[in-house]
Image (cartoon, helix red, strand yellow):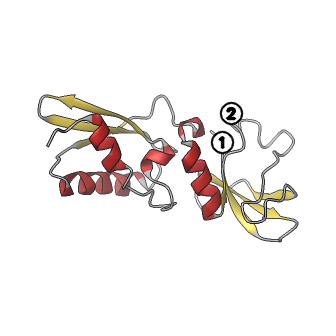
Amino acid sequence: MDINKDLIFNLLEQVPDPEVPALSIMDLGIVRDVEFNHELITIVITPTYTGCPAMDMIAVNIKAVLQENGIEAKIKSVLSPAWTTDWMTENGKKKLKEFGIAPPVSSTVDKLSLLEEEKLVCCPICDSNDTKMISQFGSTACKSLYKCNDCLEAFDYFKCH
């Protein structure tokens, strides 16, 4: 078997995010690179948030998928530059919405989210724009909690950062 980046990237499409299993780690854009150094293969990943509790499980799942295909690899986590929602694939954002989580609205950081006017977040359930943030903090650190004023459902919004 010819082991190359394309093969490994295709295999990593099978690794789900433990917190949002509808997304692969490739959809999230947390796989930064695959490095080859003689016989050693290193998968370089960046957490969506520093200290993200899912990263240990992601590393275990990466190794498992690769081992099932006869590939041994080391996992290297890098924090700089920090992960951004800009690295998510468009398909990943579509999958988020289908899963019931509002995808990031823009490609900029929510640095002033507590000080400026609330952003317009579309309800992933009924597509209404009449929504309101309930809490800056949702089910995980990377999400905020919103409520739709039309269908009355609460939903997570994947924060921009």
* Disc 1 to disc 2: CB gap under 8 Å: yes
Q: In terms of depth relative to the viewer, which is nearer, 116 or 132?
A: 132
Near-viewer residue (100 or 91): 91
Across and down, in percent, residue 66 comes to 23, 51
Which residue is painted at 60% across and 63% down in the image?
99
Quarter of the N terminus within the rendering: top left
Which one is earlier in the sequence, the residue at label 1 or at label 2? 2
What secondary structure is found at the residue carrying circle 2?
Answer: loop
10 Å crowding of disc 2: few (<14), some (14-19), many (20+): few
Label 1 sits on residue: 160
Residue type at mark 1 is Cys
**Whole-percent x and y of residue 67?**
19, 54
Question: Which sits in the foreground, 3 or 148?
Answer: 3
Q: How crowded is mark 1: few (under 14 residues within 10 Å), some or many (20 or more)?
A: some
Q: In the displayed orientation, state which residue is furthest to the left.
A: 39
The amino acid at mark 2 is: Thr
Residue 156 falls in which quadrant of the image?
bottom right
Name the secondary structure under disc 1.
loop
Percent position of residue 144, x then y: 69, 55
Q: In this view, does 84 lie to the left or right of 133?
A: left
* Side of 35 where 14 appears, left or right: right
Alpha carbon separation for disc pair 1 and 2? 6 Å
Where is residue 48 shown, x and y percent of the image?
A: 51, 44
Report the quarter where the C terminus lies.
top right
Tell me what residue is drawn at x 31 percent, y 49 percent: 11
Residue 90, relative to residue 139: is it above or below?
above
Task: Name the side, left or right, on which 108 lies relative to 2.
Answer: right
For residue 108, the mark is 2
